[in-house]
């Protein structure tokens, strides 16, 4: 049995440009891995299976991005040996935290190790699985562009802890991009450079262009943002297509204080350390 941890990510900002011929939108932003973790276990089996821990249901078979990752690595390796994948999910789904993509990246890593497939080959499989998988395969702090498939690692950010809040709505990424087109490709929520933590200031203003689209799909998101900003005394930002909102704090204590001030009814609220990787193998068994 091999085990791995898969880490959630936050899009610290996301600039979006007009839709390409292939249906994807060019994006640009700084992505950051954070300490919210899904745990995966991979073992040989009599037949393929995927399950949640404690028998909890997860998307089945090839509907599950992590299982698609396993199947892709197996195909490259020329193997047909059945595999059993167990997923212990902590990352909220449909939240803009990249949980499914993180699981897929960790599954690539696990299957690559098990079947002897090189990291460079895994990197060519990643974008076929989803736009966020290339970042999750690398993780840490990176500038991401293209449709998500161009990942340029940056120095790790220091002296930052995030308070991360998932309001009680779900937003599907394709719906958010569609709404952004229908709204006439608006510019989004911005935090001015001068209001950012010092380590982020040389990256310019932070902006998420999908904010108006996310609010059009879930209007209560704007109330949550305004309420959090008042309680926290600082700007709050949307991650990706949302609905995750976050802000910057200097340490765990300050972020934990912010989490304690979050109103009741959120799907998730936690102080999250930044981490320097997207996944890691924890048991090579
Ligand atoms: O790549 P992924 O499967 O995560 O993308 C889901 C959908 O989100 C795409 O089919 C597309 O509609 C939209 N998308 C986009 N531009 C991106 C990433 C995703 O329009 N850069």
Image: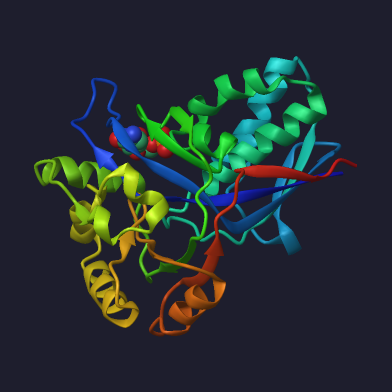
State ligand 1's quadrant.
top left
Percent from the top left, x then y, of residue 132?
46, 38
Return the residue found at the far right.
Answer: 285
Q: Residue at x 26, y 80 (%)?
A: 230
Percent from the top left, x then y, of residue 75?
68, 19
As rendered, which of 134 and 49 lies closer to the eye? Answer: 134
Q: Residue at x 49, y 57 (%)?
A: 93
Percent from the top left, x then y, of residue 71?
66, 28
Q: Quadrant of the C terminus?
A: top right
Location of residue 49 (image quadrant): top right
| Residue 81 visible in image | no
**Is residue 75 depicted above or below 191 in this figure?**
above
As rendered, which of 42 and 31 lies closer to the eye? Answer: 31
**Is residue 80 depicted above or below 47 in this figure?**
above
Question: Going by the image, does 93 lie left or right of 44?
Answer: left
Percent from the top left, x then y, of residue 249?
44, 68
Disc tally is 0
As rendered, which of 8 and 53 lies closer to the eye? Answer: 8
Location of residue 139 (image quadrant): top right
Question: Going by the image, does 102 lie left or right of 127?
Answer: right
| Residue 263 visible in image | yes
Q: Residue at x 80, y 32 (%)?
A: 82
Location of residue 16 (image quadrant): top left
Q: Quadrant of the N terminus?
A: top right
Coloring scheme used:
rainbow
Question: Going by the image, does 213 lie left or right of 137?
Answer: left
């Amino acid at each position: 049995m091999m085990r791995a941890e898969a880490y959630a990510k936050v899009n610290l900002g996301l600039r979006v440009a007009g839709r390409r011929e292939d249906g994807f939108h060019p994006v640009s932003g700084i992505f950051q891995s954070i300490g919210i973790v899904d745990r995966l276990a991979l073992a040989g089996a009599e037949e393929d299976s995927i399950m949640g821990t404690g028998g909890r249901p997860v998307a089945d078979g090839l509907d599950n991005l992590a299982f698609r990752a396993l199947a892709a690595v197996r195909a490259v390796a020329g193997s047909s040996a059945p595999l059993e994948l167990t997923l212990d999910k902590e990352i909220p789904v449909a939240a803009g935290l990249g949980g499914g993509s993180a699981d897929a990246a960790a599954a690539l890593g696990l299957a690559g190790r098990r079947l002897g497939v090189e990291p460079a080959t895994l990197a060519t499989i990643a974008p076929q699985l989803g736009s966020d998988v290339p970042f999750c395969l690398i993780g840490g702090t990176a500038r991401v562009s293209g449709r998500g498939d161009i990942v340029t690692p940056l120095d790790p950010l220091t002296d930052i802890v995030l308070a991360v809040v998932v309001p009680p709505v779900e937003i599907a990424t394709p719906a958010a991009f569609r709404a952004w087109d229908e709204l006439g490709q608006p510019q989004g929520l911005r935090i001015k450079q001068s209001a950012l933590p010092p380590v982020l200031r040389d990256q310019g203003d932070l902006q998420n262009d999908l904010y108006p689209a996310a609010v059009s799909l879930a209007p209560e998101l704007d109330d949550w943002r305004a309420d959090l900003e008042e309680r926290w005394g600082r700007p709050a930002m949307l991650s990706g297509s949302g609905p995750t909102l976050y802000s910057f704090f200097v340490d765990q204590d300050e972020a934990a204080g912010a989490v304690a001030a979050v109103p009741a009814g959120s799907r998730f609220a936690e102080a999250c350390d930044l981490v320097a990787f997207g996944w890691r193998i924890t048991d090579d068994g």
